Amino acid sequence: MEIFGVPIQAMMGQLLIGLINGSFYALLSLGLAVIFGLLNIINFTHGAQYMMGAFVAYLLLNLLGIGYWWALLIAPIVVGITGVVFERLMLSKLYKLDHLYGLLLTFGLALIIQGLFRHYYGSSGQPYAVPPELTGARNLGFMFLPNYRGWVVGASLVICLLTWYVIERTKLGAYLRSATENPSLVQAFGINVPRMITLTYGFGVGLAALAGVMAAPIYQVSPLMGTDLIIVVFAVVVIGGMGSIMGSIVTGFGLGLIEGLTKVFYPEASNTVIFVIMAVVLLVKPAGLFGTEK
Amino acid sequence: MSAQQSPAVSSSGSSTGGVPRHQLITFLAMAGFFIVAPAVLYPVFLMKIMCFALFACAFNLLIGFGGLLSFGHSMFLGTAGYMAAHSAKVWGFTPELAILFATACATLMGVVTGALAIRRQGIYFAMITLALSQMIFFFYLQAPFTGGEDGIQAVPRGKLFGLIDLGSPATMYPFVFLIFISGFLLIWRIINSPFGQVLKAIRENEPRALSLGYDTDRYKLIAFVLSAGIAGLAGATKALVFQLASLTDVHWSMSGEVVLMTLLGGMGTIFGPVLGAAAIVTMQNYLAQLGAWVTIVQGAIFVVCVLAFRRGIIGEIANLIKKPL
């Protein structure tokens, strides 16, 4: 069977890779959007924190013998705590200044973290085995789906929707959204906004770390795994606009798929297609597909 | 003298009063340093500093005076480097033609990318420029003429105007010095021109500048293009100095480095970027054998500067003597 002269097996394979990449774009841009909503800071450290998540999983396995499933829980908490400490000690000092300083600070932190990991673990990747429960693949009739990849797509979809539900449909989310609109008014109602900001940052960072753990068996665990990825995620965020949580999720998965399709039909452009789409979106709708002009 | 007596005019040193004396002295000290230094220091090292200083000054024109943080300035440095190297090596351009051609290419790229980037502000502007430069990076990674990971090597320096052989430091150094000083003076002139004043007004309060009747988008685009062009001039010169154009110059980490140089020296100062560039290049020279530590130290300087030292070195000095530098 062929579609536009491309065997359906190859097509589905690339689409699956696209969907996997899309899962990570969605998880990471979701974290960026949540953080940006409350802190007005673009978290440049996001890629490094994603990498830290993968490394925590790797170290848990190799030093303590703790496997993938516990790592899924522990790594986001550990990395989230480092994020909370960073926010309290440094980031919180900058809220009254131009937001660009927040970008510069988190960029500096990303350099430090990546440099430290590169110093101790080198630039090459360390393998991380797929958990035994998820090895193997199943035949879907038109393609083979490796179990682990299916799990990543499903799990990240669930996490994204859960985050969307918490923010858009619960009381806690209502506080968050109102603090995004007008922090001082929310504080006047007796809600501890600074603590909420800190926890939000921790949560966003935890999401990045969770994505890192899920990525560890697919890509290798390496100090530089987050650097190029975060730049693509920035483009995803520009395309989607950071105004809407659902927007980040849809844009993330959608762009992953488009990237996968590009690999099938015009592989030379697969690295750049997201940036080209960004340029087009900027021309047509500068605020982003789901964004509103402030 | 007028500078000290009438503070109302002195602070900007604009149009009529000429250059304030302390700035003139600083300029002469800087120029003097680069004239005398080759006697003591390795000329290629000094030429590297001058190229990066010009690059940082161009970047500073945008962030320091226009308030626009570009995180993709490496695309102009790198593009000009490739264009200069290719035109000099493959097409046999003379050095001055190669540099002019490369600068024109960077300027043109500035027009296109600038027109896209200024459609958003603040943090988005930074992300867009970063994403665009990453796109350019991937383009050069795949384009056949750049030589991929190897870069364009053994670029001939050629003969200036077909007469002066730039092969030796004795001729190359004055040539680079002239380019650096002309670029620096051009930026200085732009800052003090009416155009520069409008740019500062936009930085301070864009809606207000808009309401006063200034087409702020046009001003921002012109500033972006000027900055891109001068960054290109630095990149083209650098390619001839090192006889090499490589992916390092288009990589996003180079964009980060120029931000760091400017931040360390002092954003929005005239001389800060030069000092910042000298400091960072020197540091890289000493830490080069330590590998990943260069990145760690750079990150630490970022953190310290942002948290405790936002004016930068020259900015702090200017604050101490209460005069803009």
Image: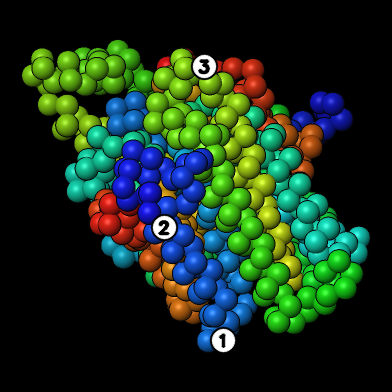
Which of these two is toward me, B196 or B13?
A: B13
Q: Verify CB contact (< 8 Å) between mark 3 and mark 2.
A: no
- The percent coordinates of residue A175 (x first, y second) are 21, 18
| Identity, as a three-letter code, of the amino acid under mark 2 | Arg
Residue lying at 78% horizontally and 75% vertically, measured from the top left: B166
Q: Verify CB contact (< 8 Å) between mark 3 and mark 1.
A: no
- The percent coordinates of residue B70 (x first, y second) are 52, 42
Q: Quadrant of residue A274?
A: top right
Determine the chain carrying the residue at label 3.
B
- Same chain assignment for discs 3 and 1: yes
Within-10-Å neighbours for mark 2: few <14, some 14–19, many 20+:
some
Residue designated by label 1 = B39
Q: Nearer the viewer, mark 3 or mark 2?
A: 2
Q: Quadrant of residue B129?
A: top right
Within-10-Å neighbours for mark 3: few <14, some 14–19, many 20+:
few
- Seen in the picture, residue B220 relative to A48 is either above or below; the reply is above
Residue designated by label 3 = B213
| Identity, as a three-letter code, of the amino acid under mark 1 | Ala
Image color mode:
rainbow
